[in-house]
Amino acid sequence: MIYAVYFINGARGFWEGFWQMYVIMMIEGLFDRLFIDFYWVGKTKAWLIPKTEEFMPYIYGKTLVFKWLGTLIGSPVLAAALSGIMMLLVKN
């Protein structure tokens, strides 16, 4: 992702890199939370493991909350950290 943002897209500086990485991380995180966790694992039988039905749902409430917090809070923090590092390494 860093290579794509800074070397393919040509981002320079903190804000330009931050918003691009933030958008990429949020799309990835929301896809994972909504499609994979909620729909694919939670609603379809694709992840039904024989003889483990008593352990359903496979993604419990507390884990789900931490995953959402990681997506909503962790994505901007990680994007800011990576942009800060790249701001120091990539010169205009």
Image (tube, rainbow, N blue to C red):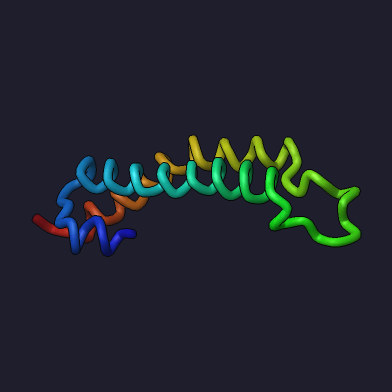
Name the spot of residue 22 as percent of width and height, x first. 35, 43
Residue projecting furthest to the front? 45
Query: In the visual, does 54 lie left or right of 33?
Result: right
Q: Nearer the viewer, residue 53 or 86?
A: 53
Q: Quadrant of residue 42?
A: top right
Residue 68, image x, y percentages: 57, 37
* Residue at (64% x, 39% y) in the render: 66
The residue nearer to you, when weighing 28 against 11, is 28
**Residue at (73%, 37%) from the top-left corner?**
62
- Looking at the image, how many numbered discs can be counted on the residues? 0
Q: Which residue is at a point 21% across and 58% down the rendered structure image? A: 6
Q: Specify the farthest residue to the left.
A: 92
- Left or right, 90 with respect to 82, comes to left
Q: Where residue 19 sits: x, y (%)?
A: 28, 41
Q: Is residue 2 left or right of residue 62?
A: left
Q: Quadrant of the C terminus?
A: bottom left
| Residue occupying the point 44% across, 49% down | 28
Residue 64, image x and y in percent? Answer: 66, 39
| Image quarter in which the N terminus is found | bottom left
The answer to whether residue 71 is above or below residue 53 is above
